[in-house]
């Protein structure tokens, strides 16, 4: 019987003979270069169809957090890998898509008994080229429309209203299942806070912050409330962006006054709103260093 359709893998072959790419990475970055190469191949092996696009900033931050590497060093190593052919240069330079044809070939045996065949670089390239053509065509149409009828939404309030289909897409809620979390039914959508997935994102993006050891009922209630408060928050992508914003804050990540936020602190109502409003934003702890000592104590206790 054929195996069910699957688009990732549990392992990839690692050849002991040094190739050109590994030699260059090790020569320039030492063991960090070898570690990055290995972690990248492991990461791509786990991904659906074994590639990732990091053009979006939040995806880029998440990607390099997973590989435990700074963005500037990681990008330089990927550039080297594209020059040696280990990473497809066209997809990387044009779309910031990371895919290795060598890895795809090495994974072909894993797909031997599957219903689906492994994706090819040509298929990935065609997908992104089609998307680019659609975007270019849309931009051209919008440009022509604006030139023929340069009316702003302020001049004509009707044009500022969302199309019904667009509005439905914006309010559509992803469906998640979480054992032990009571479901709230809204029409046909079941709004259930995916605690485990959000905690996994927190651990992946913010390894420098205290890990979650126990997720008590009180903590579940805090996170569930933040999840349900607004439809836009009922998405793992929203929480990924939220944690990426936290990562950019020197104060929340322990670089100012020694304070380290944790997940419970982040989802407490007052703290949550202040993070969203950008109170702790920045690389120098904007809005923190100017506070009086007693204000710092309140923040550290989660009361400010």
Image: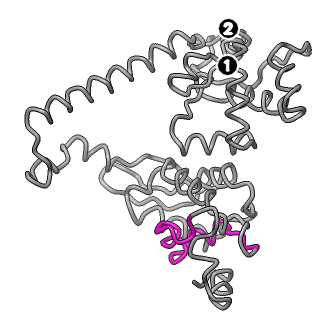
- Residue 209 x/y as whole percent: 72, 62
In the rendering, at what x and y percent does residue 188 appear?
32, 48
Q: Nearer the viewer, mark 1 or mark 2?
A: 1
| Nearer-the-camera pick, 184 or 194 | 194
Label 1, label 2: how many angstroms apart (C-alpha)? 28 Å
**Residue tagged 1:** 82
Tell me what residue is drawn at x 82 percent, y 25 percent: 25
Magenta highlight on residue 93: no
Q: Please tell me how crowded label 2 is: few (under 14), some (14-19), or many (20+) other residues with Cα within 10 Å.
A: few
Whether residue 290 is situated above or below residue 239 in the rendered picture: below
Bounds of the magenta span? Answer: 258-281
Which numbered circle lies on residue 112? 2
Label 1 residue SS:
helix
Q: Is residue 120 left or right of residue 144?
A: right
Q: Is residue 272 magenta?
A: yes
Q: Residue at x 61, y 17 (%)?
A: 89
Alpha-carbon neighbours of circle 1 within 10 Å: few (<14), some, or many (≥20)?
Answer: many
Residue drawn at the location 38% of the way across and 23% of the way down: 131
Q: Does residue 31 sit above or below 244 in this rendering?
A: above
**Quick check: 225 above or below 270?**
above
């Amino acid at each position: 019987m054929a195996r069910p359709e699957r688009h990732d893998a549990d392992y990839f072959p690692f050849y002991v003979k040094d190739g050109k790419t590994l030699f260059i990475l090790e020569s320039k970055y030492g063991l960090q270069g070898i570690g990055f190469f290995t972690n990248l191949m492991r990461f791509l092996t786990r991904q659906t169809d074994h590639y990732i696009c990091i053009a979006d900033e939040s995806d880029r931050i998440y990607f390099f957090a997973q590989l435990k590497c700074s963005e500037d060093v990681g990008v330089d190593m990927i550039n080297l890998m594209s020059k040696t052919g280990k990473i497809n240069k066209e997809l990387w330079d044009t779309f910031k898509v990371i895919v290795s044809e060598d890895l795809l070939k090495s994974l072909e045996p894993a797909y031997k008994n599957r219903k689906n065949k492994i994706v090819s670089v040509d298929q990935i390239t065609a997908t992104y080229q089609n998307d680019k053509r659609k975007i270019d065509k849309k931009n051209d149409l919008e440009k022509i429309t604006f030139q023929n009828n340069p009316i702003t939404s302020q001049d004509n309030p009707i044009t500022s209203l969302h199309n019904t289909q667009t509005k439905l897409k914006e309010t559509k809620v992803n469906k998640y299942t979480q054992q032990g979390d009571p479901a709230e039914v809204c029409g046909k959508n079941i709004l259930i806070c995916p605690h485990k997935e959000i905690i996994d994102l927190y651990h992946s993006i913010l390894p420098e912050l205290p890990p979650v050891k126990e997720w008590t009922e009180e903590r579940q209630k805090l996170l569930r409330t933040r999840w349900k408060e607004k439809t836009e928050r009922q998405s793992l992508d929203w929480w990924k962006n939220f944690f990426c914003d936290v990562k950019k804050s020197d104060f929340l990540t322990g670089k100012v006054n020694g304070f380290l936020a944790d997940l419970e602190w982040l989802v407490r109502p007052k703290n949550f709103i202040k993070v969203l409003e950008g109170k702790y934003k920045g690389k120098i702890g904007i809005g923190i260093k100017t506070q009086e000592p007693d204000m710092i104590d309140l923040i550290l206790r989660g009361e400010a």
